[in-house]
Amino acid sequence: MSEWRVPLSEPDYGVEEEAAVTRVLRSKWLSMGPEVQSFEKEFAEFLGVKHAVGVSSGTAALHLSYLALGLGPEDEIIQPAINFVAAANMSVAVGATPVFADIISLHEPTICPAEVERKVTPRTNAVVVMHYGGYLCRISDISEICRRHSLPLIEDACHAVGAHYRDSDQESPYRMKAGNLGDIGCFSFFSNKNLATGEGGMAVTNRDDLAERLRFLRSHGMTTLSWDRHQGDAATYDVMLHGFNYRFDEIRAALGRTQLKKLERNNQLRKQLVSLYRRELAALPGWIVPFDDAAGYGSYHLMVAVAPDEQVRGRVMKRLKEVGIQTSMHYPCLSDLKAFRRFAACDLRNSCSFSRRAITLPLYPTMTASQVEEVCSAIFSVAAQDELTEVATGSPRGDSR
Ligand SMILES: *Cc1c(COP(=O)(O)O)cnc(C)c1O
């Protein structure tokens, strides 16, 4: 694998996954069969959602969600400026316009409800939220805005598999899970996600009409699958609408089923590592660790800290790299990316600041407490060096705004 002493993430794979893959190889049926059906059923039960549709990626889930909701040219899709590029790219793919809304603050880098309200126009036809790092966004405020304006709500829940609410006024424990809080929820099973199958995704919904469209769109709008024909249940097919090949396969579905069994335990392990990080990093002056008073339970997908300024972040990333610790940043502000400048908004102050100062630190369920301490002491060594420089030159390196 990598040369990193501490990688950014690592899947928790063992003998169960090996057995799952072997089981499929021996069955000699490789795509869209009993494993996919079982995974969809188990995933739906886990979320308490009526329908789960396995697809080839999180991006495919987003694309199909937009199409199932009938989004297209002339439509504006309000979405967070801090997100992976998939939700925005798929907006453009269906001919719609992504409208970027600012995040709440550096402490809570999820889409700001007041910003959503402000950006609604007669052309707005959907709102996308993202549960950044695995922490729930202000979903009840956003749902209320969507209800008032009759807008469908799509959750990009790719970070948030297993994250849930604990609001007493939620009607049932199941309606509290990320991905099951809007009209359609989208998940990714990419290699670095909490539930990893390499590539893969899931679109979930409680609406029968949307589920039917998602299933048709996933496989060329065809009325039967190869599996049905193999079973002798059907000999031919019709095509109901123009779809894609976004099917999921048996090997990855089998991997997904084993990963789903480990998910709650692994999210709990992530939570403990995050608590340790928080305790350690609290001693760093000028740093922010977002979501310190988060509502409910996260999935603890990312360990993100916000440096006092861009220069400090740069020095920390450089130092960690030198000692073999991998870091990343989630994400550049979408309106700063070349292909999205034509959709730029001038009022994304918090998002711009966040993207310049945020650093993602290693976090994965098999990580050890001493590795967390190693990461933190490397950060502290940069802070100590900066203090020495300050004493020597009499001026702080960079300001903390
Ligand atoms: C991973 C991810 C996606 C895209 O998922 P893929 O499976 O890689 O297509 C979309 N949104 C977010 C927030 C993600 O983290």
Image (cartoon, helix red, strand yellow):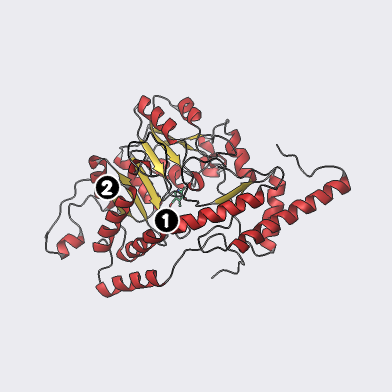
Residue 312, horizontal then vertical, whole percent: 71, 48
Q: Looking at the rendering, which quadrant does residue 13 occupy?
A: bottom left
Q: Looking at the rendering, which quadrant does residue 255 occupy?
A: bottom left
Query: Which one is nearer the viewer's eye here, 278 or 154?
Result: 278
Residue 213, horizontal then vertical, whole percent: 25, 44
Q: Which mark is residue 51?
A: 2
Q: Which mark is residue 264?
A: 1
Q: Is residue 297 above or below residue 143?
A: below
Q: Amino acid at mark 1?
A: Glu
Q: Is residue 274 above or below residue 121?
A: below
Q: Residues within 10 Å of mark 2 (few under 14, many from 20)?
A: many
Q: Secondary structure at mark 1?
A: helix
Q: Residue at x 62, y 48 (%)?
A: 305
Q: Amino acid at mark 2?
A: His
Q: Which mark is residue 98?
A: none
Q: Secondary structure at mark 2?
A: strand
Q: Residues within 10 Å of mark 1 (few under 14, many from 20)?
A: some
Please state the total of marks drawn on the protein image: 2
Residue 22, horizontal then vertical, whole percent: 33, 74
Q: Does residue 184 appear anywhere in the picture?
A: yes
Marks 1 and 2, the one that precedes in the sequence: 2
Q: Does residue 195 appear anywhere in the picture?
A: no
Q: Is residue 384 above or below residue 333?
A: below
Q: Nearer the viewer, mark 1 or mark 2?
A: 1
State yes or no: discs 1 and 2 in contact (Cβ < 8 Å).
no
Gap between marks 1 and 2 measured at Cα: 21 Å
Assign the C terminus to one quadrant of the image: top right
Residue 101, horizontal then vertical, whole percent: 50, 34
Left or right side of 322 for 295: left
Left or right side of 302 for 28: left
Q: Residue at x 46, y 35 (%)?
A: 138
Determine whether the beta carbon of the residue marked 1 sits less than 8 angstroms from the nearest atom of ligand 1: no
